[in-house]
Amino acid sequence: MPKSRRALARRVLLKTVSGLLTGAVFALEVVTDLTPGVRMTTRRRLPNNMGAGILGAEVATWWAISPSLLPRPWWITAANVAICQGVGHVTAAGAAWGLGKLTAAAGRRPPTHLTTPSLSTTHVTLAAVTAVAAVLSLRRQGQQADLIGARNRRGPRHALVGTAVGTVGYGALLLLGEAAQQGVDRMSRRLGYFLPPWLSWPLAAATVGALAGVASDRVLLRRFLARAARQAELVNRAVFPGTSMPWEPERSGSPWSLEAWTAVGSQGRALLSGGPRARNIAEVTGLDFAREPIRIFIGRVPGRTLRQAVDLTLAEMDRTGAFHRDTLVIQTSAGTGWIADWSMEAVEFLTGGNCATMALQYSYLPSAFSYFDDRELPATAARMLITAVLERLERLPEDNRPKIYVAGESLGAYGTAAAFEDLDDLLNRVDGAVLSGAPRFTRLIADLTRRREDGSPERLPIVDGGRHVRFVAHPAHLRRDFTGRPYRRAWDHPRVIIAQHASDPVVWFHSRLFWRRPDWLTEPGSRGIPAPPGQHLDVFPGMRWVPFITAWQVGLDQLTSTTSPSGHGHNYHAEMLYYWAAVLGEGVRVELTTDVVARAERWIRTHSVRR
């Protein structure tokens, strides 16, 4: 290599290393400067123009470590702290800049304590508040973890580590912000040669922002979504450990089935392979005789339309004799084809196997991606299947028709609810429904919540005195409302249960949460009735609403909501036995004693396929 090229390469390498070291030192200075102990000293490391932003970040930290719906693992705390500090920094810096412009226009000097960090009462006070808030957050994290029985996995130690890592992340965000600011300033100076200042800077900012948006869309977002789609397709082809082709004719994917084992996808294979057989149902329930439950699942196959999948479902129902069972349940799956084991197996145990469950897969993407890709697809798939089955039932003699129920969890609950025009349409067409963990954008549930009786909370609305619909957070709400009193009206069939835990972020997250305080955070008694023996309320009472912060926290809570213990977060488990017993009514063949519930719960936990 010529000497000139080697010299050039050496200079580039030195500049790169120098830039990296400068960035690392800057991030370290940010972290150090946010430490309360350093804030009380006379030495200030950050540039003067960052004073207001640092103060804003520190104030935002108080809310970032405040309680949310669920105790957080350390990495959720880190993401929460980093983003909230970044938002606080931008907000305070923008306010200081605007105030400076206003005071300059008025011919006055801006207050120095907003632009020059110094040893002052403000800094000492904020540092002291930060230290107190950090100590309180560790205590609250432990209390929250105790509420859901997850102290070992989400205790104070996780909060401490997450806060430290999140502050480092905030330093990294400042580096990105400084780089963007440098780019805007340089472009503004060049544009200033032939444009007035009032136009050059906004144009430069818009140009840099547009370039960053295009780069993030094409380089990050699109690649991320494409990679997620490829990964989801590979997972859909996988066979989860513990799954094998069923040999019962009553199941799709068996050698007798019209739907091939290879066509049902990974979630379908787990569903068709698992679950109780007739002998298991008899052992758990104590029945002398139990029937083999029917499970029908139609996978998503390239080239197969939804209409063809629905027709194949009906053909499988004819083949297995599903229309001759007493109980039919149409389950709407979540995005990947996932269906809640607890909901489906509760029906099989309670009916003694005299039931048939039908479902089809409309996507292999996870629920969030599936909704983003086509939000109407879950509703369309549910509506087509429910309509087709109901039309077939109308051809049967009225005195020889099975009872038909609909169900779904998470995005499946949204799809099931969206298949009906309103509550009257649902009550007129089916014999009952169990919807658990439905997202906030589910129109039917939102309408029922708005129609709730005066005085009933948003978390546990009372609709028409509990005549047909009952919102529940745990089985005690089946007979008593949020105050602990019996419902005003008798519970008539058809019955609809809408299960939503107070700590389920999937249920309570909504875009309006960014700028509007929800009722469920202010209503007294909305977190549940007095807990029966062995049960506890699962939301920390000190949770408060803050613009942006609360929505961001609840949004992050969704990432770990399915890893919470049973009965909390987005996990609806053993309670499903009680919910389905209430909805099925005369279709229940088993006395739901404590021993039966314990045996059923133990069997499901032991034999559930992890997926």
Image: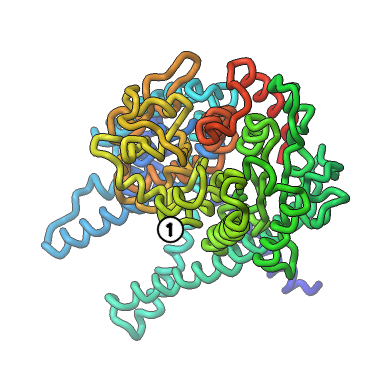
Quick one: quadrant of the C terminus? top right
Q: Nearer the viewer, residue 302 or 220?
A: 302
Res 152 → quadrant: top right
Q: Nearer the viewer, residue 114 or 322?
A: 322
Q: Does residue 64 sit above or below 539 in this rendering? A: below
Q: Residues within 10 Å of mark 1 (few under 14, many from 20)?
A: few
Q: How many marks?
A: 1
Q: Amino acid at mark 1?
A: Glu
Quick one: quadrant of the N terminus? bottom right
Q: Nearer the viewer, residue 442 or 214?
A: 442
Q: Residue at x 84, y 48 (%)?
A: 254
Q: Does residue 211 sit above or below 525 in this rendering? A: below
Name the spot of residue 315 as percent of width and height, x first: 74, 58
Q: Residue at x 74, y 67 (%)?
A: 302
Q: Nearer the viewer, residue 327 or 602?
A: 327
Q: Does residue 540 sit above or below 118 in this rendering? A: above
Residue on which the image places disc 1 = 421
Name the spot of residue 235 as percent of width and height, x first: 75, 52
The answer to whether residue 164 shows anywhere in this view is no
Q: Residue at x 61, y 21 (%)?
A: 597
Q: Residue at x 42, y 63 (%)?
A: 181
Res 605 → quadrant: top right
Q: Secondary structure at mark 1?
A: loop
